[in-house]
Amino acid sequence: MKNVEIIGTGSCVPERIVTNDELSTIVETSDEWISTRTGISERRISLGENTSDLAAKAALEALKDSKLEAKDIELIIVATTSPDSYVPSTACIVQGLIGASNAACFDISAACTGFIFALNTAAQYIKTGVYKTALVIGAEVLSKIMDWKDRNTCVLFGDGAGAAVLRAGEEGIMNTYMASDGINGREFLRCFAAQNKNPFMLESLDVKDKITMNGKEVFRFAVKVMVDSIEKVLEAAQSNIEDIDYIIPHQANIRIIEFVAKKLKIDMSKFFINLNKYGNTSGATIPIALDEMNKQGLLKRGNKVIFIGFGGGLTWGSVLVKWTI
Ligand code: ACO
């Protein structure tokens, strides 16, 4: 069976910066509250670009970085909670925008764990020899589905996209782990799609088609599953935390990451953090962080890196990668 290497990365965030102070003119909040509770200082908000627009720009950058052309891609998976449309998939729209004429395309819905699920799915196709080259994208325009009157949520999220090109190789992805709990936790973080109001129904439900969240429950869940996810991939790869050069966590809240660092007795310098600049971009946080690390030259060939995601569903998971560029 083949292995799977990451051979290029890209990212794209909207130009418009919205600071905490600016948010305090929309809802009753303050820079002090947001930064001390979350670590977020500002986020990028789309002024009209849709999820596929950001995704396509990130994809083109990743293709350039990998020195491949769009027609070399055989599979495109977009992880998103904020697709452009029910039909077509955002992946098909990206295919059209970048001209990836030889790719099969579909979306994955796993909230903030989406990029981990998409990476793992693409890796399975490559490992089994079905495809050699895949493009995996995490992309969100969450500002479409925010309740801009709800200070519990609207201060936390942002828009953006990140992408990675995967190719069959000798080394690379060492282990993956995915998990879900739709039994106990599906109501903690929610955004309904259109509800059925067909003419044959006697009455229809009116539900909220914007994000709602039980922040305290998500916080508790996040700390627990981040620790579990790190331990699971290390165990499966027969590695220990001292062998790991970097951890790229889902960027939701600095306090969650600090709790995890304390619990596992890991120095905070092992975690790459950029949530202060972008807030929580859901499925896009990990590939944006990965691209920033790659572009800043932080990742050296042979480095071992863990990506960890957690989010609505509930979903969580991790990937252990040996960096090969
Ligand atoms: N500004 C000012 N006050 C606020 C704000 C705000 N933006 N938001 C809430 N408050 C108030 C609350 O109303 C509450 O007031 P009250 O005591 O009068 O009722 C008070 O601040 C304290 O609220 P808490 O909920 O106790 O604040 P907490 O310390 O738990 O922090 C937070 C809230 C930041 C949401 C935290 O719980 C958290 O980070 N949870 C995890 C969220 C997360 O990671 N979500 C992403 C999941 S990934 C995905 O799939 C999308």
Image (cartoon, rainbow, N blue to C red):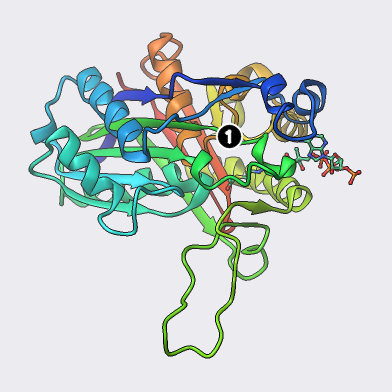
Q: Where is residue 285 in the image (x, y as percent from the top left)?
A: 50, 32
Q: Give me the residue at 21% from left, 34% from top.
A: 167
Task: From this view, report whether residue 39 is shown above or below residue 252.
Answer: above
139 vs 236, left or right, is left
In the rendered image, which quarter is residue 219 located in?
top right
Query: Residue at point 46% right, 49% down?
Result: 81
- Seen from the viewer's position, the closer of residues 40 and 49 is 49
In this view, 261 is above or below 274? below
User: Looking at the image, which is closer to me, 134 or 274?
Assistant: 274
Task: Work out whether residue 279 can be spotted.
Answer: yes
Number of marks in the rendered image: 1
Tell me residue 60's x, y (percent).
23, 25
Residue 272 in sight here: no
Q: Is residue 214 left or right of residue 316?
A: right
Query: Which residue type carries mark 1?
Result: Asn
Which residue in the structure is indicated by mark 1?
A: 280
Query: Is the CB–ligand 1 distance for label 1 below 8 Å?
Result: yes
Q: Would you place residue 190 above or below residue 54 in this image?
A: below
Residue at the far top: name it: 297
Q: Is residue 228 left or right of residue 115?
A: right
The location of residue 323, given as percent across then percent down, is 37, 23
At mark 1, the secondary structure is loop
Q: In which quarter of the image is the C terminus?
A: top left
Q: Tell which residue pokes out farthest to the front in this image.
A: 199
Q: Which residue corresponds to the image point at 37% horizontal and 33% vertical from the top-left? A: 49
Tell me which residue sits at (32%, 24%) in the image: 9
Ligand 1 is found in the corner quadrant, namely top right
- The image position of residue 129, as x and y in percent, is 16, 49
- Of residues 257 and 149, which is closer to you in this image? 149
Mark 1 nearby-residue class (10 Å; few <14, some 14–19, many ≥20): many
